[in-house]
Structures are given as structure tokens and as C-alpha cells.
Amino acid sequence: MKLKEITSGELPDIGRPVAECVNSGEWTLYRPSPASGETSDNFFLKMGPEVYVLDSRGKIVRIIGRDASPAMDEVFYFSDLPKPQSLSNGNLRLTFH
């Protein structure tokens, strides 16, 4: 699985609240592998038990169940919106006694 960054302007039909949920890890924006048979322009947005198929602008095309969704190949985050800091960024210092 590859992690990729895009700007929110590349998917103008996705609202900022949705993009912020993607960046926070609550929801997952992804594309499947080309072998899945899905159009390469389509994005998938996993929101709990539901998976939404999005067009190349981020508009919902259809809703599918989690069991019918193709496997994730590329996972996307928005580079121009805030993302939470990870533990690996060194902002948390642990002291063992």
C-alpha cells in the first residue's frame, strides 16, 4: 500500500470537514489497484461500514458495502490541511525510571 498526498483543490467536491476526517484518520480515502477493474479516476471513501465511490472531482457516484469494496492500493491524505502529529515526530518524550 502506498501513501500519497494531494491538495484539497484536486478533489474540489469533497468538503473541508470530510477532508479533515480523512487527515485525522477517522475515514480513509483510497484508490484500488488497477487489477480491481475499477476506473482509475475513481476514489473510494471508507466511512465506517460504508464505502463511497467518488469521481475524479470527489463527487459521490455510488455507495457500496465494505464487503464489496476493492482492496486499498493507494491511500491519500491532504497536504494542504492539518494532520495530527505522530509519535514518531518526537513531540512526545517518554522517561523511564
Image (cartoon, rainbow, N blue to C red):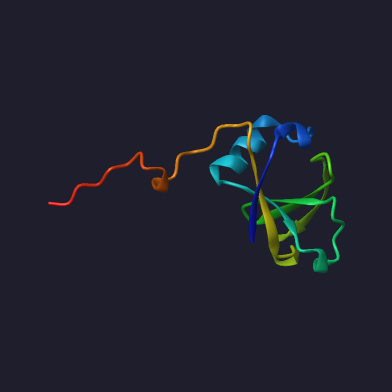
Report whether 69 appears left or right of 80: right
Residue at x 44% of width, y 44% of height? 86
Q: Position of residue 40 (x, y in %)?
A: 84, 55
Residue at x 84% of width, y 44% of height? 56
Q: State whether residue 94 is above or below residue 73.
A: above
Residue at x 25% of width, y 47% of height? 94
Q: Nearer the viewer, residue 45 or 5?
A: 5
- How many numbered marks are there? 0
Q: Quadrant of the N terminus?
A: bottom right
Most distant residue in the bottom direction: 35
- Specify the quadrant of the image occupied by residue 39: bottom right
Q: State whether residue 64 is above or below residue 7.
A: below
Q: State whether residue 68 is above or below residue 77.
A: below
- Specify the quadrant of the image occupied by residue 20: top right
Q: Position of residue 74 (x, y in %)?
A: 69, 56
Report whether 36 appears left or right of 86: right
Q: Position of residue 22 (x, y in %)?
A: 62, 43
Most distant residue in the left direction: 97
Residue at x 39% of width, y 46% of height? 87
- Specify the quadrant of the image occupied by residue 11: top right
